[in-house]
Amino acid sequence: MTIVSSSCRICNNSELDEITYLCDSPPANNFDHTFKGQNNYQSFPLILDFCKKCFNLQLRHCLGEDLLYSNYTYITPKSDSLNKHYANLLEYAQNKILNLAESDVIEIGSNSGDLLKYFKPKVSSVLGIDPASNVAKIANNEGIETINEFFGNSLAPVILSKRDNIKLVIARHMFAHNSDPSDMIYGMKKIINDDGYIFIENAYAIDTLMHGEFDQIYHEHMFFYSVKSMISLLSNHNLYLHDIIFSDVHGGSVVFVASSKDMGQTKILKKQIEIEDSLFDEKKIFKLFLDKINEVKLFVSNEINKSKQQNLVIGSYGAPAKAFTMFSFLKLDQQTISFCVDTSVTKIGKKFPIFNIPIISENELQEKNYDVLLVNAWNYKKDILAKSSRIFKKGTKLIFPLPQPECIEL
Ligand SMILES: [Zn+2]
């Protein structure tokens, strides 16, 4: 089911400003393993709308779970930087929340339970909630009790029957993925204590826009949260934004720290509100965003057209969700991009739907004849360049669309 909203899904304002119609694109992360071609897959418009009233940025089309997650497999990667981030969040919570040690901690979208493993020895109990049965099973097997359900207001009584002293609810990188954030906030408000806190971690809309990261716009990302829009969402449910924490994980994230009681606004939060006020003034930030998108489009299209004229073989590197938007936006398919290299075993051997670009491993790349690679996984630029001499042929031209459009010849 697809919901098309002409009004704001946070405040119901019916007068939204269209920021951009990027392109039509199929749901990201759903790879074709049937090889039946284009018939089974559909594209939907990626249109970004802005609400002047509450500063909400949303996709006009929200696809249903059946479309988004039918062939979906995502397990939180394990990495040192994530482990450090989990430890930091625990330390922050211990400093901020009185008697955290005696309280229950809930994580929504807890995946395989990695974060809750940090909290478990330091608090009274932990409880995870995740709709994906495969990851919920992993968590339960590893001793992190996990309810295998979608979280919303209707699940609150179930949680309260299991835990009754909840001082902290955490939701990491899932808030943009739900078409009804108000229902989730309402449910959170119901389960936390009067002195409880909520940590909502997400990509930061201001960074996404300022960096021109248009490929972060895909169907799973239905909302792009700023401090201002988060305050609007929370205040509808008598919750208060108290603090923000910036971190490097997932290419730059923000943790919104909300509280049941009004704990005031921290210095860093107040400063960020001022910055946002000036960026949203006369929609300055959207102009910067659209200029950057055009710059990237011109640069990459030009490089690809030049390579085609010289009969060079063009491939691409990385098959993350944002590659769907990159291919759709630049209208690239197998006619132009012969293959896409990825390291994930869940993707190798499959094809991008619609574009029909096959995904191959780094080993298979060694046997290929190619000259140019468009790097979709540009956020790993440093790592890719560090291992480039090992995985790529000498003389290969790498096209990085972002953070700055540039070509690097190896
Ligand atoms: Zn609104």
Image: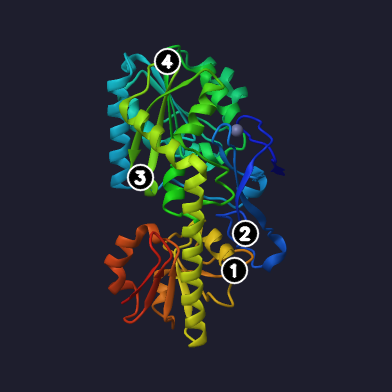
Q: Identify the disc placed on residue 23.
A: 2
SS at circle 1: loop
SS at circle 2: strand
Q: Residue at x 59, y 63 (%)?
A: 328
Amino acid under disc 2: Cys
Label 1, label 3: how far apart the Cα atoms are:
30 Å
Label 2, label 4: how far apart the Cα atoms are:
42 Å
Amino acid under disc 4: Asp
Q: In the shown orientation, is residue 301 left or right of residue 4?
A: left
Please give the residue where the numbered disc 4 appears in the rendered image.
Answer: 262
SS at circle 4: loop
Q: Residue at x 60, y 23 (%)?
A: 153
Name which of mark 2 and mark 1 comes first in the sequence. 2
Q: Picture quarter containing residue 142?
A: top left
Q: Nearer the viewer, mark 1 or mark 3?
A: 1
> Dot 1: few (<14), some (14–19), or many (≥20) neighbours within 10 Å?
some
| On-image quarter of the N terminus | top right
